Image: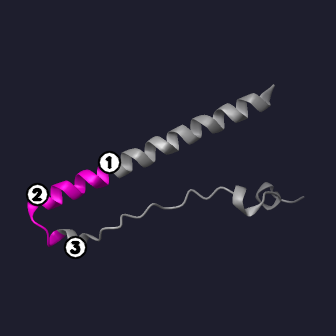
Amino acid sequence: MPRFEEELPQLLRWDPGIIYDPIPEWWIRGLNEAQQVELIAVRLEVTRQVLQVQAEGLGRAVEVLRSKKG
């Protein structure tokens, strides 16, 4: 019996992926404190937005699954 993953096209297989921080730590250390604080704020905002989009996607997935239930 084939596994469920093998039955799905590659584009539909779950791959949560990794969102990389584009700014390396060594580069941040060379900045002044105000710049560091600004970049940390950017990092936090990006993380917040990613989590928000992921939560919305999960909510929509739940809706789809629930609609197939009945």
Location of residue 33 in the rendering, given as x and y in whole percent from the top left corner:
9, 60
Is residue 17 depicted above or below 47 in this figure? below
Q: Quadrant of the C terminus?
A: top right
In the rendered structure, which amino acid carries the disc numbered 3?
Trp
| Residue at x 70% of width, y 60% of height | 11
Q: Look at the image and say whether residue 30 sits in the magenta stretch.
A: yes
The label shown at residue 45 is 1
Which of 2/67 is in front?
A: 67
In the rendered structure, the answer to whether residue 7 lies left or right of residue 24 reads right
Residue 1 in which image quadrant:
bottom right
Q: Which residue is mark 3?
A: 27
Residue named by callout 2: 34
Q: CA distance from mark 1 to mark 3?
A: 19 Å
The mark found on residue 17 in the picture is none
| SS state under label 3 | helix
Q: Which residues are magenta?
A: 29-44
Give the mark nearer the N terminus: 1 vs 2: 2
In the rendering, at what x and y percent does residue 36 appear? 16, 60
Percent position (x, y) of residue 23? 30, 68
Q: Is most of the magenta stretch helix, strand or loop?
A: helix
Amino acid marked by disc 1: Glu
Relative to 61, residue 3 above or below: below
Amino acid type of the residue tagged 2 in the rendering = Ala
For label 1, the SS is helix
